[in-house]
């Protein structure tokens, strides 16, 4: 018996959305260097040092853009997300810069260092088991959370903000043949 798999349709983010994000991302993030790896192999390898971002992750790019693009009325009510770390830190910093409250629904197994970082950025943390966090992301709602939900990975504005990193790579290394990127969300 054959099994069927389902996949979500590919997501097409308009280039204009990415360009607009790039114009504003430096209000919260830095332009990180592209550094050649000291490697004696058949290819030149460069590293994009996103670990130098204010939260140590590229997620500030997407989080800031997503919060920035919310209508003022939604932003004023505050924002919330679901995260075990970096996306939560990004949304917390974006909310702080916007002067609005932030809550993060955190997986109850999240590392203490990530929880501390989100708290230091002003986020109110609400712990829940993984299945509740996942359901909250799918439903974009949770009874303990207030304000506007900022999806940590399934949001065009979040993706456009993160994609600003790709524009920087193309600007710094126009002759690039391939870009390999790790990704994740939450």
Image (cartoon, rainbow, N blue to C red):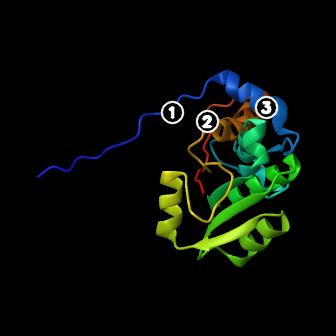
Badge 2 element: helix
Q: Which of marks 2 and 1 is in front?
A: 2
Left or right position of 163 against 26 = left
Task: Characterize the local packing of mark 2: few (<14), some (14-19) or many (20 or more) Cα atoms within 10 angstroms.
Answer: some
Residue 23: horizontal and vertical position, in percent? 83, 29
The numbered mark, 3 or 2, whose residue comes first in the sequence reads 3
Of residue 134 and residue 85, the one placed in the foreground of this image is 134
Answer whether residue 67 is visible to the viewer in this image.
yes
The numbered mark, 2 or 1, whose residue comes first in the sequence reads 1
Q: In which quarter of the image is residue 110?
A: bottom right
Identify the residue shown where x is 72% and y is 42%. 74
Q: Quadrant of residue 122?
A: bottom right
> Residue 156, labelled with which disc?
2
Residue 22: horizontal and vertical position, in percent? 79, 31
Of residue 86 and residue 105, the one placed in the foreground of this image is 105
From the viewer's perspective, is residue 149 above or below residue 65?
Answer: below
Q: Are marks 2 and 1 in contact (CB under 8 Å)?
A: yes
Q: Are marks 3 and 2 in contact (CB under 8 Å)?
A: no
Residue bearing the label numbered 3 = 22
Answer whether residue 174 is visible to the viewer in this image.
no
Task: Characterize the local packing of mark 3: few (<14), some (14-19) or many (20 or more) Cα atoms within 10 angstroms.
Answer: many
Left or right position of 66 against 185 = right
Of residue 158 and residue 143, the one placed in the foreground of this image is 143
Give the Cα separation between the discs numbered 3 and 2: 14 Å
Residue 48: horizontal and vertical position, in percent? 75, 46
Give the Cα separation between the discs numbered 2 and 1: 8 Å
Task: Characterize the local packing of mark 1: few (<14), some (14-19) or many (20 or more) Cα atoms within 10 angstroms.
Answer: few
Q: Which of marks 3 and 2 is in front?
A: 2
From the viewer's perspective, is residue 152 above or below residue 157?
Answer: below
């Amino acid at each position: 018996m054959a099994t069927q798999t389902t996949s979500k349709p590919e997501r097409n983010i308009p280039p204009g959305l990415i360009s607009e994000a790039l114009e504003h991302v430096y209000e919260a993030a830095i332009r990180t260097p592209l550094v050649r790896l000291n490697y004696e192999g058949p290819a030149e390898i460069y590293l994009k040092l996103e670990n130098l971002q204010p939260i140590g992750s590229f997620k500030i790019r997407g989080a800031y853009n997503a919060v920035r693009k919310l209508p003022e009325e939604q932003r004023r009510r505050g924002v919330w997300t679901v995260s075990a770390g970096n996306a939560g830190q990004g949304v917390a910093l974006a909310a702080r810069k916007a002067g609005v409250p932030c809550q993060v629904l955190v997986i109850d197994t999240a590392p203490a260092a990530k929880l501390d970082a989100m708290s230091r950025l002003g986020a109110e943390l609400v712990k829940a088991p993984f299945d509740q966090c996942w359901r909250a992301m799918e439903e974009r709602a949770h009874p303990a959370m207030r304000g506007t939900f900022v999806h940590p990975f399934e949001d065009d504005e979040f993706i456009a903000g993160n994609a600003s990193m790709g524009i920087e790579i193309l600007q710094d290394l126009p002759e690039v043949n391939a870009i390999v990127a790790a990704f994740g969300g939450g």
